[in-house]
Image (spheres, rainbow, N blue to C red):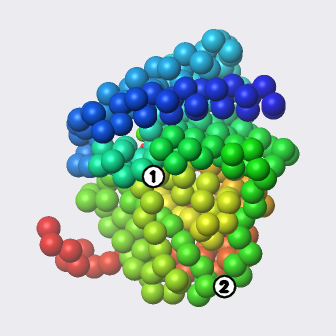
Amino acid sequence: MLQFLDVATEAALTGGAILQSYAGQVEAQEKGRPGDLVTAADKAAEVAIVEVIRRHFPDHGILAEESGQVGAAQSEFLWAIDPLDGTTNYAHQYPFYAVSIGLLMDGIPQVGVVFAPFLQELFRAAKGMGATLNRQPIQVSRTAELQQSLLVTGFAYDRHETADNNYAEFCTLTHLTQGVRRGGSAALDLCYVACGRLDGYWERGLSQWDIAAGVVIVEEAGGWVTAYDQSPFVIESGRILATNARIHAALSQTLLQVKPLPANYLLS
Ligand code: IPD
Ligand code: CA
Ligand code: CA
């Protein structure tokens, strides 16, 4: 585990340095859906990260956001890499973005490193070894009531195409809590739950590279990660509920009760 953690850290620091070398100097292009951006920095960071992983573990599988499946297809090890989680923030010089590197073994996230290069915060965890922020142990918050909680969520790029776009959940939970943030980086949202700055996080429409690392970091910090209905988390579902454990049941019940907003609620 330690070797995996060290290599993930080397790769994340390498990628983060590349992001900072391009920061404020790159133009973003839409990849497909409105708002789904990519920059030269995403691509350059990914190439460097993949090179580090491949150099140490040539037999492992790699799933990277900009290149897809690039490593060995049959391996029990899969590295899920987001070279820049929070591209919209990055393109606007809003400093909440990170490199996210997770290692799955037989489909289960086991090692996670998330590095926010502008903020100089390095989150790390491996199964059974605890979670750290800049090498200091971290723990989830002790908030026990939704009414006292500060949450975070996000909205996938297909939000214009589906009524299952999380808008109703966002309104409802804004009403029931001290607030709901929209961080713009799923990986960092999870890390902020892990270190107790936020009490809970939910989102749908995610990819494995967004959350593989953060899931391990939350769990190793004492949090819970499940599906919305508290059944076991399945990373391929793209749907996640991650909390400090204490508000988990209440947040789950609320999410299950929310009805989508009427189709004519927003201007088309
Ligand atoms: C996005 C961020 C965002 C989440 C989106 C993701 P990207 O990743 O994690 O917080 O709401 O669903 O796609 O595009 O910045 O790598
Ligand atoms: Ca992402
Ligand atoms: Ca990305």
Q: Secondary structure at mark 2?
A: loop
**How many angstroms separate mark 2 from mark 1 (CA)?**
27 Å
Crowd tier of the residue under label 2, counting other residues whose Cα lies within 10 Å: few below 14, some 14–19, many 20 or above: some
Q: Position of residue 175 (x, y in %)?
A: 45, 86
Q: State the residue at coordinates (23%, 35%).
A: 27
The image shows residue 88 at horizontal and vertical percentages of 33, 48
> Residue at the spot x=77%, y=41% of the render?
126
Position of residue 69 relative to residue 137, above or below, is above
Q: Nearer the viewer, residue 77 or 150?
A: 150
Q: Which residue is mark 1?
A: 96
Q: Position of residue 147 (x, y in %)?
A: 59, 87
- Relative to 257, 89 lies left or right: left
Q: Is residue 130 left or right of residue 153?
A: right
Residue receiving disc 2: 145
Is residue 225 among the parts visible in the rendering? Answer: no
Query: Residue drawn at (29%, 49%), measured in percent from left and top?
Result: 92
Task: Give the residue type at disc 2.
Answer: Glu
